[in-house]
Amino acid sequence: MKKKVYVDMDGVLADFTGGVSGLDEKTRLEYDKRHDEVPNIFLNLEPMNGAIEAFEKLAGAFDVYILSTASWNNPTAWSDKLVWVKRHLGDLAHKRLILTHHKNLNLGDFLIDDRITNNGAGGFTGELIHFGSSQFPDWKSVLAYLLGKES
């Protein structure tokens, strides 16, 4: 049985920071400290460097799901995340997107997330891989670590 890996979307698969930087100044100020509420912000995010290739490799070795959170105050976030996953990961991620504010309720071996305390990530019962940390600064380091833990 393959080990189960959950991958966060924003800041891990999709470049949310880059998306915020691309907003016009008026919108950035209007949604200050709540950029996840900007309508359609998730729709056109660019993939993080190496994310698509890494997801493909992980999907070959593990049972992989995308575990993300969508703002309650941004109805487009829910559908936009689905469109993003279909556009960038296609059949590889078909029916593998889970949107939740309680990541700790999902059982698995690994969770790759850039935020380790929000939305239940800190209560995840498997191993939490802190993406963007000094130990796991990028997808290359995450892949090297996880592929060594396969099966």
Image (cartoon, rainbow, N blue to C red):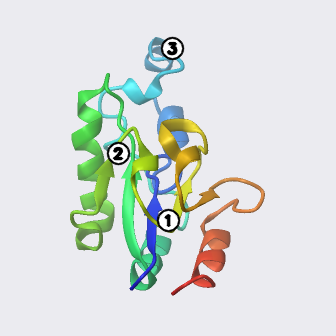
Mark 2: amino acid: Asn
Q: Secondary structure at mark 2?
A: loop
Report the side of 145 relative to 60 (left or right). right
Mark 3: amino acid: Leu
Mark 3 or mark 2, which is nearer the start of the sequence?
3
Tell me whether circle 1 and circle 3 mark residues in contact (CB < 8 Å): no
Mark 2 vs mark 1: give the one in front.
1
User: Real-space Cα distance between discs 1 and 3?
Assistant: 29 Å
Q: Position of residue 69 (x, y in %)?
A: 39, 41
At 25% from the left edge and 50% from the top edge, which residue is drawn? 82
- Within 10 Å of disc 1 (Cα), the crowding (few <14, some 14-19, many 20+) is many
Report the residue marked by disc 2: 44
Report the side of 87 relative to 145 (left or right). left
Q: Secondary structure at mark 3?
A: helix
- Within 10 Å of disc 2 (Cα), the crowding (few <14, some 14-19, many 20+) is some
At 36% from the left edge and 35% from the top edge, which residue is drawn? 41
Q: Which mark is residue 29?
A: 3
Q: Nearer the viewer, residue 119 or 22?
A: 119
- Say which quadrant the N terminus sits in: bottom left
User: Real-space Cα distance between discs 2 and 1?
Assistant: 15 Å
Mark 1 or mark 2, which is nearer the start of the sequence?
2
Q: Which mark is residue 51?
A: 1
Q: Position of residue 126 (x, y in %)?
A: 54, 62
- Within 10 Å of disc 3 (Cα), the crowding (few <14, some 14-19, many 20+) is few
At 39% from the left edge and 47% from the top edge, which residue is drawn? 68
Report the side of 4 relative to 83 (left or right). right
Mark 3 or mark 1, which is nearer the start of the sequence?
3
User: Real-space Cα distance between discs 2 and 3?
Assistant: 20 Å
